[in-house]
């Protein structure tokens, strides 16, 4: 790119000069056959990109392999289950008039399967241009294109504007060389070209709402699927984008950079009103990275929900922080229908928190949890074990913290995850540079990044191995749940009642229900 050539972006005010027939593909889910809690969720990012491309003039369709194949799980071998359409079924659903296929890959643990799917699409439809996007692609664009030569180009970061620009200049080498946030193959030399990224989309209120009419959203709603607890027809939404924090284990900074942007509360409420009318939803689940940053915004949104009286519940199932939560906020959340909130302390060891750049005040987080419990909210916490440098002593501090969450504080739910060095995170870059990741970038290593893939799990602590990591993970659950029920026997009654009614109040109840269904042979989770 020359000094005088400005990077190309493509805004909603423009129209495609050559409208294309585009098919966006969300691949099926692959999980360990032992996995109980791996969630199935509507592809919110794909729905946003589809809406944007349609708005600028392209003819867009979506193949959501998970949503279209919810009822056809297939045991592939002794270790793994495919949930969703087969690769052959996906290829058969691609529009015969299609010119460009866009394949999503959000999680690095999915890459070996996505790569295989792309290879089949290319063999069956060699005339198609294949582009890719998502969090994994953004973190590893060159590696993705090098290991999968069938890919023409990759979209980095937020997909709406960048994908539209890529489609506009697909046949224009000079324009392609100036498309911001794109990695592609030079047609003449075959070399990979990486264009600089532009800043984030500033006014996210201008983006069209997700194109749920192009996806089998009813299949998800009828099953009550999502990241949170099952509370009827749960609908996915984003209230904000990005995260201002830079935790060393998190890869979101690569995808979203570090700017947090919130939507106008009234426009968000308008989208909820539309979903209530159009889809008869019972519940909203916000998939935001960090929804709770600004207290004033949160109060305005909660009071708007209370004022409009939609008659629904809502949840914050992704781990959030505590700085903006006090008794006033907790009361407003409860009054507006919020039923579940998830905190992400990650560790009970101050030294571990410093190592992973997790700037949280554990005392403040405990107070925020107590405030939420006092107002009647269901509270969950996420813990992670096995960080580089973490010692046995650090883990025991975390286990004591788990005890405090269970008995004195009395939150409802806990998840204990093993650490994995996700591509795009600072810890991944550090460990890669130090040569500390065995089998890095192999298919087996990618599979090990899934918390549900027990067979490939690794310990990355220098002080304890895999056996100790599994033992500590089990201890975390054994400390939390039995003591929690012993200290509050009424929760046993609520657990049984909610399992019978199917309207769950905690993630633990949802997991138990899934386990019972698996035990009865009704589903693979």
Image (cartoon, helix red, strand yellow):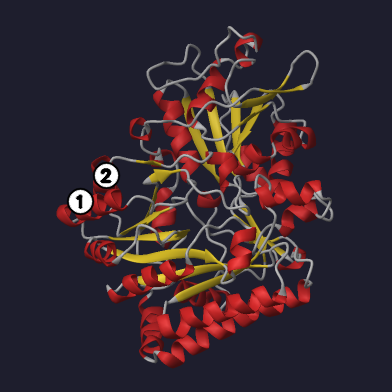
Residue 441 visible: no
Query: Is 173 displayed left or right of 431 in the figure?
Result: left
Specify few, some or many for label 2: CA neighbours under 10 Å numbering under 14, 14-19, or 20 or more: many
Residue 428 drawn above or below residue 62: below
Q: Position of residue 390 (x, y in %)?
A: 70, 68
As drawn, the label of residue 304 is 1
Q: Is residue 443 above or below residue 200?
A: below
Task: Give the number of the disc on residue 2.
Answer: none
Task: Estimate the x, y position of residue 272 in percent, counting from the top left.
Answer: 28, 48
Task: Estimate the x, y position of residue 466 in percent, counting from the top left.
Answer: 77, 72
- The C terminus - image quarter: bottom right
Q: Residue at x 55, y 76 (%)?
A: 515
Q: Residue at x 20, y 51 (%)?
A: 304
Q: Is residue 265 above or below residue 461?
A: above
Q: Secondary structure at mark 2?
A: helix
Marks 2 and 1, how far apart in space? Answer: 8 Å
Labelled pair 2, 1 in contact (Cβ < 8 Å):
yes
Q: Residue 205 occupies which quadrant of the picture?
A: top left
Say the numbered circle drawn on residue 265.
2
Q: Is residue 464 above or below residue 32?
A: below
Residue at the (38%, 71%) spot, across then down: 367
Direction top: furthest residue = 4
First in residue order: circle 2 vs circle 1: 2
């Amino acid at each position: 790119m020359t000094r005088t050539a400005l990077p190309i972006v493509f805004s909603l005010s423009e129209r495609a000069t050559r409208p294309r027939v585009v098919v966006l593909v969300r691949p099926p889910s692959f999980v360990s056959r032992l996995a109980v809690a791996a969630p199935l969720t509507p592809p919110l990012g794909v729905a946003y990109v589809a809406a944007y491309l349609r708005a600028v003039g392209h003819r867009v369709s979506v193949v959501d392999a998970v949503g279209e194949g919810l009822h056809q799980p297939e045991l592939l071998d002794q270790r793994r289950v495919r949930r969703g359409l087969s690769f052959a079924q996906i290829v058969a659903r691609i529009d015969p008039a299609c010119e460009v296929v866009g394949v999503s890959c959000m999680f690095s643990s999915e890459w070996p399967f996505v790569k295989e799917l792309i290879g089949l699409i290319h063999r069956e439809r060699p005339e198609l241009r294949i582009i890719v996007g998502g969090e994994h692609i953004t973190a590893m664009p060159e590696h993705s294109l090098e290991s999968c030569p069938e890919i023409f180009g990759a979209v980095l970061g937020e997909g709406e504007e960048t994908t539209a620009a890529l489609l506009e200049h697909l046949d224009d080498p000079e324009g392609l060389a100036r498309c911001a946030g794109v990695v592609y193959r030079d047609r003449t030399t075959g070399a990979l070209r990486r264009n600089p990224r532009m800043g984030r989309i500033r006014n996210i209120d201008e983006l069209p709402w997700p194109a749920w009419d192009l996806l089998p959203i009813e299949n998800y709603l009828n099953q009550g699927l999502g990241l949170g607890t099952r509370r009827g027809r749960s609908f996915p939404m984003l209230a904000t984008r990005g995260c201002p924090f830079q935790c060393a284990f998190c890869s979101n900074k690569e995808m979203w950079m570090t700017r947090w942007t919130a939507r106008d509360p009234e426009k968000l409420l308008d989208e909820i009103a539309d979903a209530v009318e159009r889809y008869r939803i019972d519940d909203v689940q916000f998939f935001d990275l960090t929804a709770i940053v600004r207290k004033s915004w949160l109060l305005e949104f909660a009071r708007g929900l209370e004022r409009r009286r939609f008659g629904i519940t809502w949840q914050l199932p992704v781990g959030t922080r505590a700085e903006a939560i006090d008794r006033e906020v907790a009361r407003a959340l409860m009054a507006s229908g919020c039923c579940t909130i998830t905190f992400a302390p990650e560790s009970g060891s101050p030294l571990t928190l410093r190592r992973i750049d997790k700037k949280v005040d554990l005392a403040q987080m405990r107070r925020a949890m107590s405030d939420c419990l006092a107002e009647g909210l269901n509270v969950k916490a996420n813990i992670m074990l096995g960080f580089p440098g973490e010692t046995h002593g650090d883990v025991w501090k975390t286990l004591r913290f788990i005890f405090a969450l269970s008995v004195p504080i009395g939150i409802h739910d806990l998840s204990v995850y093993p650490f994995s060095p996700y591509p795009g995170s600072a810890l991944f870059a550090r460990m890669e540079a130090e040569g500390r990741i065995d089998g890095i970038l192999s298919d087996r290593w990618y599979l090990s990044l899934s918390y549900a893939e027990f067979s490939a799990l690794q310990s990355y602590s220098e002080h304890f191995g895999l056996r100790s990591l599994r033992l500590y993970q089990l201890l975390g659950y054994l400390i939390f749940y039995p003591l929690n029920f012993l200290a509050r026997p009424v929760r046993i009654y609520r657990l049984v009642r909610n399992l019978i009614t199917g309207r769950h109040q905690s993630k633990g109840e949802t997991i138990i229900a899934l386990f019972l269904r698996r035990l009865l042979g009704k589903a693979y989770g």
